[in-house]
Image (spheres, rainbow, N blue to C red):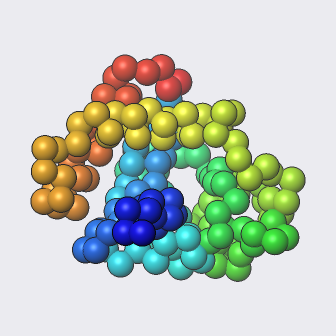
Amino acid sequence: NINLRGSQSAQKQNSWNTIRVWWVPILARGKLHVELLGDGFPGETQEGAAIMVAKVRAALNLRFQGGGAPTTLFVDRGAGFYHTSTGGITDGFKRALREKGLRAFMGNDASKQPGALQEVMLHETAVAWVRYKLARCVPARPWIETVEEYGARLKAVVAAVNQEHDLE
């Protein structure tokens, strides 16, 4: 029958010509910042983790020019950071942290870190605020929004989050 409902998973997949925009939230000492990860970002891979670490280091250097920048990075157990089966740190993530003078909060072994911490972790709360606000300012014709326009909208939302919420 042609009127049967399709698979729910198919409805959630990317459409033709869809662009995925990756960004990283940086929550440091009471201020939220986001960095776009750029075209061709390799996603949840060790290479992607290295790019993300470099972006975080650059943002911290800019924000804390007088010194005193945080050196500990808290991330989830994403595939680029830790091996999904063992929880051991990936070589690429470990190398990127070392090169940028950062360390992972969970060290070399995140096996004890739960996979879902959305209800507890501050950065997850901040991301929820960002997603909530982004959903309420979608342009009338989102399919023509450029990556640059999305980035500007994202940064405006983050500015509003910083102004409206006590991130300290």
From this viewpoint, which residue is outermost toward the front?
1
- Is 57 drawn above or below residue 19 in the view shown? above
Pick the quarter of the image with the N terminus.
bottom left
Residue 6 falls left or right of residue 96: left
| Up/down of 167 relative to 82, above or below | above
The residue lying at 13 percent from left, 59 percent from top is 144
Can residue 159 be seen here?
no
Is 38 left or right of 146, judged from the image as shown?
Answer: right
Instruction: Estimate the x, y position of residue 158 in percent, counting from the top left.
Output: 34, 37
As rendered, which of 114 and 74 lies closer to the eye?
Answer: 114
In the image, taking residue 156 as reference, residue 78 lies left or right, namely right
Q: Quadrant of residue 94?
A: bottom right
Residue at 25% x, 53% y is: 151
Total number of numbered discs in the rendering:
0
| Corner quadrant of residue 162 | top left
Residue 33 x %, y %:
40, 43
Q: Is residue 23 visible?
A: yes
